[in-house]
Image: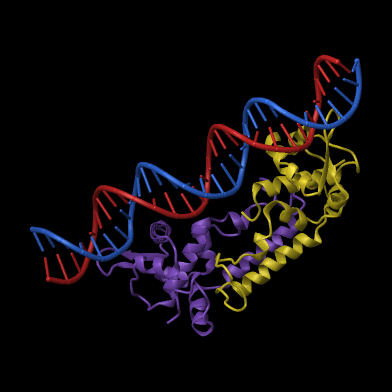
Chain colours: A purple, B yellow, C blue, D red
Amino acid sequence: MLLSKSCVYGLRASLYLASKRDGEFYSLKEISKELGISFHFLTKILQQLTADGLMESYKGPNGGVRLSQKGKDATLFDLVVAIDGLGLFTQCALGLPGCGSQEPCPLHESWMNTRGSIEHMLKRTSLIGIAREGKEKHFRLSAEGKFSWQ
Amino acid sequence: MLLSKSCVYGLRASLYLASKRDGEFYSLKEISKELGISFHFLTKILQQLTADGLMESYKGPNGGVRLSQKGKDATLFDLVVAIDGLGLFTQCALGLPGCGSQEPCPLHESWMNTRGSIEHMLKRTSLIGIAREGKEKHFRLSAEGKFSWQ
DNA sequence: CTAAATTAGGACAAACAACTCTTAAATAGA
DNA sequence: TCTATTTAAGAGTTGTTTGTCCTAATTTAG
């Protein structure tokens, strides 16, 4: 698959937060339930995004997580890189180290283009953009339809 | 990563065979050594391609594998599907089951396009096409440069 | 101050992908 | 026929990803 499960869960949780009231904290319990993601697993992933500065967390009753300013400004590319790293956008399609225009593998040229189009797609898509569009078009964020845009 | 290691190894071995003398058998020992791939692991992968009809094998001294006619006609898409399956070309970027134009996830439209461009790239690239081009341009198929086009 | 709710963090378990090893079957050649 | 060479097939091992569980640490409310 293109993105790891961790990455997909992180993206969906981020889109969830982007769709909610700005500045408020939402508990992991609620997010995991509405999106149908394992609570403990999601905790790990969002801890990573919090450590990365894309989210802010608050402990205690009525605590939870929310997007930081950096998170609100983020594109999907920023989130993917935060979780899966840059590999998808830098590595050779055939896994050859040092593949480049100097010593290209047979797929180098084609893959550079395709890879670029993936990167471009993720970079031009912002969290808040999707949140805005999602409210009109009622995009899905969960398998069973538990989640709905406000 | 986009493709599994098994898939990448299968692709590289197929490109290896496409670059060699047509109709001759090449031993897995030789292929694995020149491409720097574990012998036993490569064996498994090429067994799969043989079972799929993309390669033919011959046991005993001077035995080995070669591309079948189906293999010679194959595009990279055929090989990827044989090893990694159709998932990359059918699944939702956010892993949501039943994602489609009826109930799209936020990435559906964009991902359809990107996914299509990956599919198109793999479908327009044939093994023999690369083998021909590789002899001119000396593409790399192995990490340490053990392999060279004839 | 105490209890409850929440995230943080580590250890653990299960599933899968990647790789290794051993034995069997087929074939060629002496 | 016998031996060496090669693919076939299955079992086993290792490592990574995914998922679970338990114990802190923090904060709110009573």
Question: Toward the viewer: B65 or B144?
Answer: B65
User: Quadrant of residue C30 in the image?
Assistant: top right
Residue at the image position 85 percent from the left and 49 percent from the top: B131
Question: Toward the viewer: B93 or D11?
Answer: D11
User: Quadrant of residue A51 in the image?
Assistant: bottom left
Q: Could you tell me which quadrant the N terminus of chain B lies in?
A: bottom right
Q: Residue furthest bottom?
A: A136
Question: Toward the viewer: A141 or A99?
Answer: A141
Q: Position of residue B2 (x, y in %)?
A: 64, 56
Question: Could one spot residue A117 in this view of the protein?
Answer: yes
Question: Could one spot residue B146 in this view of the protein?
Answer: no
Q: Position of residue A33 (x, y in %)?
A: 40, 67
Q: Could you tell me which quadrant the C terminus of chain B lies in?
A: top right
Residue at the image position 52 percent from the left and 77 percent from the top: A130
Left or right: B11, with C2 as reference point: right
Residue at the image position 66 percent from the left and 64 percent from the top: A116
Q: Is residue A69 above or below residue B7?
A: below
Question: Toward the viewer: B149 or B61?
Answer: B61
